[in-house]
Image (cartoon, rainbow, N blue to C red):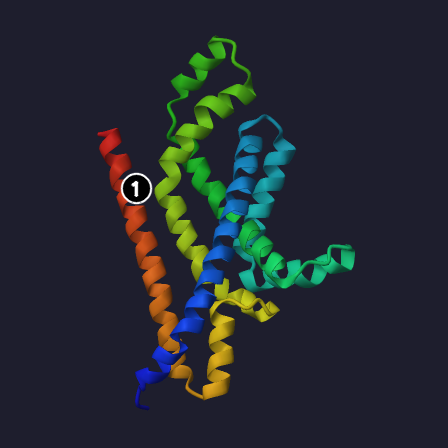
């Protein structure tokens, strides 16, 4: 089949509009992911074994089930318990809660890299656990985990096409609308692939720069 890039070029303006929605959804999901993961990390650092067990169980659930099923659960099950959500909100929540499981593990690695002597010194000065977390642990942890967080963001970006199944009009959904009208799916999907590549290549380069900067600081 011959690839006619004219159709790719004609579809580009609408695809870029969809890409903007995709980025906005991914950003919102990542904010939710970081917020939930931060709360999980703080709870894990405490002495509540029940909370730690519940968090570990949640992480195992996310790792052990397909993201598509998680999206369906948020979109179709929550309305049955009086949480009627617009598709885009359901998509953001599903992506954010799924990513939170992996972000929690990233944060655990960052937390382990913080010298314990700093925490012990803070305790000896009489600082409360919340003050230690707010002033010492969390700022250093976020500085250490910025590179893997950027990588996690690329994974969220690549997962956004799945929310098109719940009628969220993002990049993939718009691509489907275009090739259903012009009957040239190959050319349209070629444009989609290029856009995803540019977005994720940029994010990957940012992650590499952050990782190099952290390595220079540690050196």
Quadrant in the picture for the N terminus = bottom left
Picture residue at 54% right of the left edge, 31% below the top: 42
Q: Residue at x 58, y 56 (%)?
A: 94
What's the residue at 41%, 77% (across, down)?
A: 11
Image-quadrant location for residue 146:
top left
Name the outermost residue toward the bottom. Answer: 1
Query: Badge 1 local density, few (<14 within 10 Å), some, or many (20+)?
Result: some
Locate residue 4: give its quadrant.
Answer: bottom left
19 up-or-down from 133: above or below: below
Q: Nearer the viewer, residue 135 or 98?
A: 135
Please give the name of the residue rendered at 47% of the width and 22% of the height, measured from the top-left corner. Answer: 135
Q: Horizontal placement of 123 versus 76: left or right?
A: left
Q: Which residue is mark 1?
A: 210
User: Considering depth in this image, is 55 or 32 the residue closer to the camera?
Assistant: 32
Q: Is residue 51 left or right of residue 129?
A: right
In this view of the protein, which residue sits in the foreground, 190 or 214?
190
Is 168 placed above or below 4 here?
above
Task: Give the image location of residue 59, x and y in percent.
Answer: 55, 47
Tell me residue 141's x, y (percent). Answer: 41, 32
Residue 84 visible to an observer of this rendering: yes
In percent of width and height, residue 66 lies at 54, 61
Q: Would you place residue 125 above or below residue 191 in this image?
A: above
SS state under label 1 = helix
């Amino acid at each position: 089949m011959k690839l006619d890039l004219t159709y790719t070029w004609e579809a580009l303006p609408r695809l870029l509009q969809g890409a903007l929605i995709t980025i906005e959804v991914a950003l919102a999901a990542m904010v939710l992911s970081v917020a939930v993961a931060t709360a999980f990390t703080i709870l894990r650092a405490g002495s509540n074994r029940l909370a730690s067990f519940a968090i570990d169980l949640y992480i195992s659930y996310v790792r052990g089930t397909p993201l598509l099923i998680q999206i369906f659960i948020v979109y179709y099950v929550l309305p049955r318990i009086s949480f009627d959500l617009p598709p885009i909100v359901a998509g953001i929540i599903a992506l954010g809660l799924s990513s939170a499981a992996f972000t929690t593990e990233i944060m655990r690695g960052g937390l382990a890299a913080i010298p314990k002597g700093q925490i012990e010194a803070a305790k000896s000065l009489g600082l409360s656990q919340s003050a230690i977390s707010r002033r010492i642990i969390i700022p250093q942890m976020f500085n250490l985990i910025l590179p893997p967080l950027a990588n996690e963001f690329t994974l969220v970006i690549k997962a956004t096409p799945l929310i098109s199944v719940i009628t969220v009009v993002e990049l993939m959904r718009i691509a489907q609308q275009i090739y259903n009208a012009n009957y040239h799916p190959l050319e349209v999907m070629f444009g989609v692939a290029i856009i995803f590549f540019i977005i994720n290549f940029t994010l990957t380069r940012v992650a590499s720069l952050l990782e190099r900067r952290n390595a220079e600081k540690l050196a």
